[in-house]
Image (cartoon, rainbow, N blue to C red):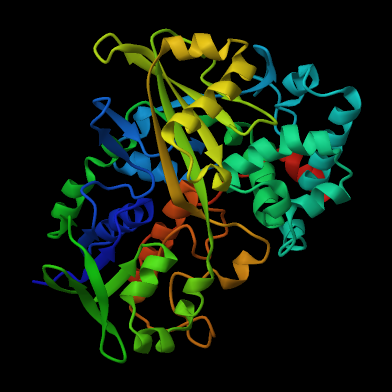
Amino acid sequence: MSVRRTVVIVGGGVAGIAALVRAVEAGWRVELIETRTKLGGRATSFDDVRSGVELDNCQHVVMGCCTNILDLYDRIGVLGEIDWHETLWFSRGNGATDALSIAPILPAPMHYAPSFVRMRLFSWSEKVAIARAFLTILRMGPRGRLGWTGKSFGEFLASARQPPRVVELFWDPVVLSACNLPSRACEAAHALKVFDEGMLAHRFAGAVGVARVPLGRLYGRVGEIAASSGGALRLRTSAKAIAFDGARVTGVVCDDGFVEAHAVIAAVPPDRLAKLCSSTLRTQDKRLANLERFAFSPILGVHLAFRRRVLAQPNLALPGRATHWLFAHEGSADVGFEQRVEAVVSAADAWIGLSEEETTRRVLVDMSWGLGVSVEELTQDLVWSRPVLEKRATFASVPGIDAIRPRSSAEAGDLRGGVANLFLAGEWTDIGWPSTMEGAARSGYAAAAACTGGAGVLADLPPAGLVRAVRAI
């Protein structure tokens, strides 16, 4: 009878969950170590004692182009918990809105054209400028994006002659939501990927998926999957160090003892990984050399419960405002409110240190502008608010960041290689995506594949025929 090989996964976020699922499928025994009481990492929920409601730590969405996180949801049996929306709403102020919708018949990249033409937020000359930039992005494709690596997306927009108002009201709302930095500060290759693969290459790519249940509930089957391998989830367990004997890692030292392993997958942020690795291990593994060089960008989510329905659309961008997006969630008589709105502020450095009262007031001012309802009226209908600041929500996708993102596995002859049975996961690793749940899922799949020899990262959605034709010209 063969003995299953054991892999210890440190970190129960999306990357760690993805690695666990793939490693179990490959026949390995999996022990997952997570400090918190819930899985999901930065994409989870918590029980808010003040409101009595389970709230997400921040609004997370998936898109149709996110093939790997959707595959992960399918494998853990929760894909049906995602509600899909094919329209993004943009406010023009005072309650007026524009809809950017996927046309039911037109193929990519023309699927947004009818609704884009009807948008009143932009003048005809501004629409021509946006279309010109989109055509440039479409023609360059993945290979052309490489030429913009290390430059800012703002530089690309300047080269595409985008007016400042268009940058502020169109490009920035999308880049902020996807990359958590404004265009002027964001790695061009990351932003170009978002617009190319998220809006142009495939009809379904831009569809937005929102979980209809709190995020923490999506991971309910993960413990069962781990147990099926003979392993377990070790929640409320703190990893202290990755054990290293000079040649290989041998397991993980935890606050409750030592967990022996044939391999270790570290699925934690770079600053946390630095604390787990000895100087000897870091000297031996070149992938660990730049862990302190990663910077982070915060996201602020503000949950607001209202007695009545104040937001008519499922989502609403507030272009040019300090609050970037609003998302509507159903309430009920049982919880004492009819609608909960989550306001999202990306790259929220300027909001750090504000009181909850001031944070709520600023969001209500922006909502008043977008919805055409007075601040006083919104305040009267407000049952409660709960700001949640994730200070280290994403790594900062600044120009040149890809040069220090490490690969998941060591490779012979590669200066970024190292210890053969130590594998890295997390959206900050060299997975080719910005800091998103899709990037996290891809990294977990890649690390598990490198560790076990099993299945790995799923392919992107294939570009539509017309997209391929344009790129071939």
Query: Is residue 447 shown above or below 333?
Result: below
Query: Is residue 276 shown above or below 468?
Result: below
Q: Is residue 341 visible?
A: yes
Q: Is residue 461 visible?
A: no
Quadrant assignment for the N terminus = bottom left
292 left or right, relative to 193 = left
- Tell which residue pokes out farthest to the left in this image: 1
61 left or right, relative to 118 = left
Q: Residue at x 27, y 42 (%)?
A: 219
Query: Can you tell which quarter of the image residue 233 is in?
Result: bottom left
3 left or right, relative to 124 = left
- Residue 253 lies, in percent from the top left, at 19, 74
- Residue 240 lies, in percent from the top left, at 24, 72
- Residue 149 lies, in percent from the top left, at 71, 63
Q: Residue at x 64, y 26 (%)?
A: 318
**Towards the viewer: 434 or 397:** 397
467 left or right, relative to 336 = right
- Residue 349 lies, in percent from the top left, at 56, 48
Q: Residue at x 38, y 44 (%)?
A: 43
Query: Can you tell which quarter of the image residue 365 is in?
Result: top right
Tally of numbered discs: 0
